[in-house]
Amino acid sequence: MQVWKFGGTSVGKPERMHSIRTLITADSGRKIVVLSALSGTTNALISMGESAKANNDAEVQEKIDALKAHYDAFIKELYSTEESLKKGQTIVDNEFNFIRSVLKSRPFTLKQDKELVAQGEIMSTQLFQGYLEEQSESSVLLPALDFMRIDTDGEPELETIEALLGDMLDHQTDKQLIITQGFICRNPRGEVDNLKRGGSDYTASLIGGAIRAEEIQIWTDIDGMHNNDPRIVKRTFPIRELTFEEAAELAYFGAKILHPSTITPAKMRGVPVRLKNTMEPQAFGTLIATTTTDREIKAIAAKDGLTAIYIHSTRMLNAYGFLRRVFEIFEKYKTPVDMITTSEVSVSVTIDNDTNLAEITAELSEIADLEEHDRDLSIICIVGDFKADKEGIALKVFEAMKHIPIRMISYGASEHNLSILVWSKDKAEALNVLNERLFYYEDAMKNIFTAQ
Ligand code: ADP
Ligand code: ASP
Ligand code: MG
């Protein structure tokens, strides 16, 4: 069995939903199909929640009306029979009644907010299932809220998911297509929760891992993982093959095409992940698996919104146990550290979640001297196959970046990653110069010499 996930743009128009049906029924393989909300819906729901929190009822009303009008028009083009249109209208009307009632709750808490944003995926899957029924396909909608579980830290519980989903699938052996929602789940209190923005990718890989799928396919609006961020860099190209480790580094360090945690369950259970373009299904895309044969430097990604903390301690000189005390403080505040550099008496780290920055720096000050921290930093992450005996990679990278101020460098932690911390204002320039130097320079040189 395979798991296929379609993102927001892939389900965002009625004709796209029609093409998805063609794609998922083109072969006879049984599939679990994970859908995101229609593009723009999650943002619209979040924005309604903000207006409700601000007690701005007029604004809430306006936003509900605009989104409902969008869905009313959407179903008219999605369905072709009167009967299914009627059913579709009932789905939309019921859903918007529910959305209205949630938005009326006062106080409007995080719990309500999470119920509200879940409605995007709940609507897209119901509407799509209605369309498959209209077309007499053999399909069933399994609610993700019945099997997708997270623990108190917001981490998915793979074993529980495996048991619950396995049981549900045992009762659906006659159905060819199993439709479910991405992104949404339940927490240990039984409340509706989610896997954070972009979380539908993670749903797909959790399901793929749980059922030990043959393959997980992530269908989106681009022909695979590109060698650099196509929103910022002009000349980019799709990478045919990546290892799990390389893809995980790219996703973690900002390649938006994948939710940062997507690779973990797939890698754990050895399920290959294929990235495909809904708009161009014949394109190869990217295959993420255990081994690859591709080029040495694979891709570059960037992660924004980082804060650097600079910690000095003369006690660190020849001391042991100092780093443990430093990291215990980050652990206490559940704050992951992205990058670390050390010198004789100093250690610098970056974090992206600065919710507890004041508490962390206060506790660090008890054991060390802190320099003023810096905000608005970005990590540029260069990913590839950097075996210890490879020469010249760092030279190419720093030659390209010679005019860009660098705050920190990390190399050697894994064989796949060279990370450089820069000011966010310099990120676009860094991505572009690295792109030219690492992916086009050698070819350009070859062309010059063959022309001579
Ligand atoms: P979906 O809605 O299908 O989940 P996303 O918008 O989350 O799609 O992810 C796809 C987008 O990721 C692309 O349109 C592209 O702009 C962006 N992106 C950022 N970095 C990369 C990269 N390295 N390769 C491909 N796409 C990338
Ligand atoms: N709809 C959710 C979001 O916009 C999840 C997803 O699309 O992956 O973040
Ligand atoms: Mg996404």
Image (cartoon, rainbow, N blue to C red):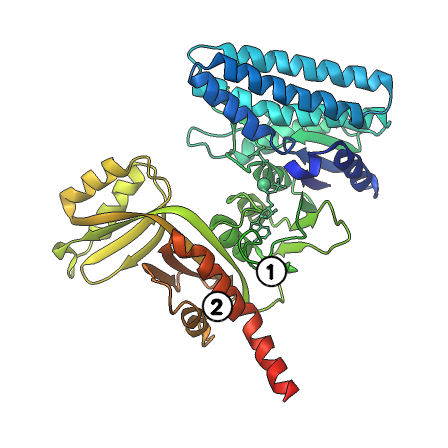
Q: Is residue 380 above or below residue 23?
A: below
Q: Nearer the viewer, residue 357 or 330?
A: 357
Residue furthest bottom as drawn: 452
Q: Quick one: quadrant of the C terminus?
A: bottom right
- Residue name at image x 46 percent, y 22 percent: 50
Q: Is residue 255 visible?
A: yes
Q: Earlier in the sequence, mark 2 or mark 1?
A: 1
Callout 2: helix, strand or loop? Answer: loop
Q: Which quadrant of the figure has residue 418?
A: bottom left
Give the residue pinned by disc 2. Answer: 386
Q: Which residue is farthest left?
A: 314
Residue labelled 2 has its Cβ within 8 Å of some atom of ligand 1: no
Q: How many marks?
A: 2
When the figure is inspected, residue 238 is found, relative to residue 146, above or below; the finding is below
What is the x, y in percent for residue 160?
55, 30
The residue lying toward the viewer, choosing from 91 and 194, is: 91
Q: Left of 286 or right of it: where is 324?
A: left
Place of residue 115 in the rendered image (x, y in percent of width and height, measured from the top left): 53, 20
> Left of 410 or right of it: where is 309?
left
Q: Is residue 417 left or right of residue 117?
A: left
Q: Is mark 1 within 8 Å of ligand 1?
A: yes
Residue 31 image position (x, y, % from top left): 74, 38
Q: Residue at x 52, y 35 (%)?
A: 197
Secondary structure beneath dot 1 equals loop
| Residue 196: x %, y % from top left | 50, 34
Ligand 3 image position (quadrant): top right
Location of mark 1 (residue): 236
What residue appears at the point 58 percent right and 54 percent down from the top-left corner? 230
Quadrant of res 5: top right
